[in-house]
Amino acid sequence: MKTASRHLAVAFGIAAVCLPAAFLLTFLLLPLWSWIEANYKIESVGHSGPADWCFWAVYSLLAVVGLGVSALRARRK
């Protein structure tokens, strides 16, 4: 039971760290979002910055990669 709670704490930690990282990375990727909007006509950039889906896409990618790395490290031990 101790390892399960540790894995859960690590997952919550990764999710928490991904929030500010995703916020920053979403704004740094503004040229990409503008390119997507211009080429694919998907609303990506509004008057106040990138659309919500851009943030959630970056957050999801960071969380999946972070959890995957964590799972690989746990499996090796």
Image (spheres, helix red, strand yellow):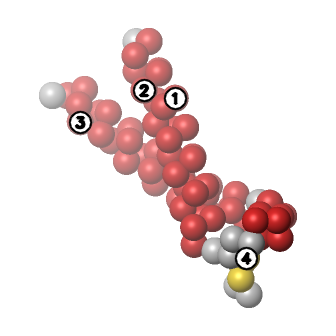
Residue contact at pointers 2 and 1, CB within 8 angstroms:
yes
| Residue at (40, 16) in percent of width and height | 75
Quadrant assignment, res 10? top left
Secondary structure at numbered mark 4: strand
Pick whichever, 38 or 57, lies toward us.
38
Label 3 amino acid?
Ser
Amino acid on which the number 1 mark rests in the picture: Val
Question: Element at badge 2?
Answer: helix
* Residue ID for mark 1: 69
Relative vertical location of residue 38 with respect to residue 68 in this rendering, above or below:
below
Which of pointers 3 and 4 indicates the residue nearer the eye? Answer: 4
Few, some or many residues within 10 Å of mark 2 (<14, 14–19, 20+): few
Q: Give the mark, 4 or 2, whose residue is nearer the N terminus.
A: 4
Quadrant of image for the C terminus: top left
Residue under the image location 40 percent in, 21 percent down: 74
Q: Residue furthest left?
A: 1
Q: In the rendered structure, which disc, 3 or 4, sits on the residue that comes first in sequence?
A: 3
Which amino acid type corresponds to the residue marked 2 in the rendered image? Ala
| Alpha carbons under labels 2 and 1: distance apart | 5 Å
Q: Is residue 28 visible?
A: no
Q: Position of residue 36 (x, y in %)?
A: 77, 64
What residue sits right under mark 2 in the picture? 71
Q: Nearer the viewer, residue 7 or 65?
A: 65
**Residue marked by disc 4:** 45
In the rendered structure, the answer to whether residue 62 lies left or right of residue 12 reads: right
What distance separates the C-alpha of mark 1 from that of mark 3?
18 Å
Give percent across and percent down for residue 11: 38, 42
